[in-house]
Amino acid sequence: MVTRQKYLALERKPINISAFKVPKGNIHIIPNRCKECLYCIELCPNSVLEKSDSINHKGYHYPRVKPGKEDSCVACSMCEWVCPEFAIFVKEVKE
Ligand code: SF4
Ligand code: SF4
């Protein structure tokens, strides 16, 4: 099985990658809509999210941004697309 670390080591980067700007995103979470399916956490390509220690009013642990990962969101919207409860969305940071 190819682990994530091995995959990243094999990943090729375009030679002109410096010509492109990587977008930044701000994550917004609506805790009380979450049902702890974890899709957003599992499918984030940059492992930005984790399960919160707190629970919402339905008793579910909603996601939060991992400490130290505040600047790692690339505004890909994957978490937003996979959330069945519309509990998370991203806004791209315009500089
Ligand atoms: S927008 Fe993309 S990079 Fe940012 S938290 Fe969601 S899945 Fe991760
Ligand atoms: S995908 Fe939505 S419902 Fe599932 S854990 Fe993430 S925020 Fe909660």
Image (cartoon, grey):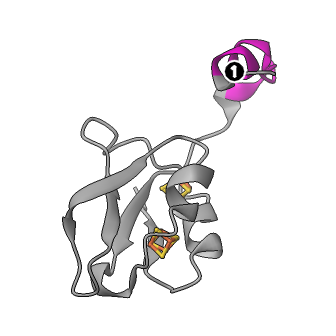
Taking the magenta stretch, the answer to whether it contains residue 14 is: yes
Front residue of 91/53: it is 53
Query: Left or right: where does residue 87 sit relative to residue 9?
Result: left
Taking the magenta stretch, the answer to whether it contains residue 77 is: no
Query: Left or right: where does residue 30 sit relative to residue 55?
Result: right
Magenta residues span: 5-17
Furthest toward the front, the residue is 59
Question: On screen, 25 above or below 21?
Answer: below
How crowded pointer 1 is (Cα within 10 Å; few <14, some 14-19, many 20+) is rated as few
Furthest toward the left, the residue is 54
Residue behind mark 1? 8
Whole-percent x and y of residue 28? 35, 72
The number of numbered badges drawn on the structure is: 1
Front residue of 25/89: it is 89
- SS of the residue under disc 1: helix
Query: Left or right: where does residue 89 sit relative to residue 58?
Result: right
Q: Amino acid at mark 1?
A: Leu
Question: On screen, 89 above or below 53?
Answer: below
Whole-percent x and y of residue 20? 67, 38
Question: On the rendered image, what quadrant is the C terminus found in?
Answer: bottom left
Residue 16 falls in which quadrant of the image? top right
Question: On the rendered image, what quadrant is the N terminus found in?
Answer: top right
Whole-percent x and y of residue 75? 54, 58
